[in-house]
Amino acid sequence: MTAPAAGISLHSKLPDVATTIFSVMSALANECGALNMSQGFPDYDGPDVLREALGRHVMAGGNQYAPMAGVLVLREQIAAKLQRYYGIEANPDTEITVVPGATEAIYCAITACIQPGDEAIVFDPCYDSYEPAITLSGGITRHIAMGEADFGIDWDEVKSTINERTRLIIINSPHNPSGAILRDSDLRRLEVLATQHNLYVVSDEVYEHLVFDGEQHCSVLQYPGLRERSFAAFSFGKTFHVTGWKTGYCVAPPVLTVELRKVHQFVAFVAVTPVQLALADFMMAEPNFPASLAEFYQAKRDLFCKRLVNSRFGVRPSPGTFFQLLDYSQISDEMDTELAVRYTRERGIASIPISLFYQVPPAGRHLRFCFAKREEVLLKGTEILCKI
Ligand code: PMP
Ligand code: GLN
């Protein structure tokens, strides 16, 4: 083998992209021994029966490549889940693709849609994986900031941003990092605009079951005008507390699924076989598990927030996800990127600075905390925050 020539360099296709802040903050938390409320993952395991099923399938020989679209029994369980929770018909053969994580679904969907010069609209604060995928396809990302008062979308602004080059709109509800949700009226506006302008939609719904206070998740799959033009991405990691299993799925109509799979088969080809088999067993045995999540996480959110009532942080409404934004404008005017690092080092608590998810840094001052943590961690975390 020839060693690379000294001084070799690569002209970056993503010159403005650094290691994700989630990896950076988790590494810093570990280095400092800080409470890690930064990266979004639970500090508890998925259900025993699910993990036992994985061990069983590994020992029983489910260890070779799965079909490219995913193990059929799992796709059938996904179809049953879509019917049960949303009253949606989806064909396991032609409309459901199992992938190694929602991130891959989103990447493949964007790659399938975007031609060089096409524009894609995203909403800031915007999950960090969308724009690099658009850029790598030669697309142009148009950022629209969500309203800082409520993290809502101004659909009139969306309307005026759409032009003849606009190809795609990417939405994310429940929304990371704000916790905001899109409601029926939002999806109806999107349906009209997407239909009128013949746009594709990528809908990141990984937190679909984490919607609180009696509200319901609205999926693009429930709106006929959106169903026919959308790729909806979901993640088992969030729903079954197994983010490290990196398995999700994409639901899209047959013509879009054909193109999605053309990309998927050369990005990852397949998702991990025994994980898929274990998930299928669990979904068949415990179809109501996802319905229990809202109460489970609402209790965590409420505990975290109630304990901060007398702190100097402003607690923002969080109707969905397992994230809570805290407004620190009464405490400091430091940049959130600096403050998050300082709190990790000096106070022993790690969070995520959200200004990195904006094209134009926001006026507000917010840090994001993940409350998918055991009670003792939430108690310790709020104790630290109340002393600040
Ligand atoms: N979208 C959003 C908004 C997320 O927060 C995450 C993960 N935390 C993903 C996509 C990716 O999910 P997965 O781990 O299944 O790739
Ligand atoms: N999406 C998770 C978060 O928001 C982290 C996933 C990742 O690290 N890419 O924290």
Image (cartoon, rainbow, N blue to C red):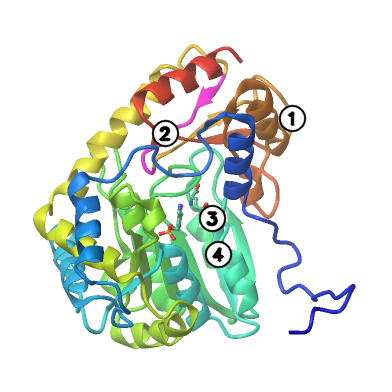
Q: Which residue is mark 3?
A: 127
Whole-Å distance between the Cαs marked 2 and 4?
24 Å
The single residue placed furthest to the left in the displayed view is 285
The alpha-carbon separation of the residues under discs 1 and 4 comes to 27 Å
Residue 173 seen in this snapshot: no
Residue at (70%, 51%) from the top-left corner?
A: 360
Amino acid on which disc 3 is placed: Tyr
The amino acid marked with disc number 4 is Tyr
The magenta segment is 313-321
Q: Residue placed at 63% from the left, 30% from the top?
A: 32
SS of the residue under disc 3: loop
Give the quadrant of residue 133: bottom right
* The label number, if any, that marks residue 130 in the structure image: 4
Do the residues under discs 1 and 4 have CB atoms within 8 angstroms?
no
Q: Position of residue 224 (x, y in %)?
A: 26, 73
Say which residue appears at 10% left-offset and 55% top-offset.
285
C-alpha span from label 3 to label 2? 18 Å
Element under disc 2: loop
Circles 3 and 4, Cβ within 8 Å, touching? The answer is yes
| Left or right: where 327 falls relative to 104 | right
Q: Which residue is mark 2?
A: 371
Q: Amino acid at mark 1?
A: Glu
Expressed as whole percent of the image width and height from the top left, the position of residue 297 reads: 31, 36
- Ligand 2 closer than 8 Å to label 1 CB: no
The secondary element bearing badge 1 is classed as loop
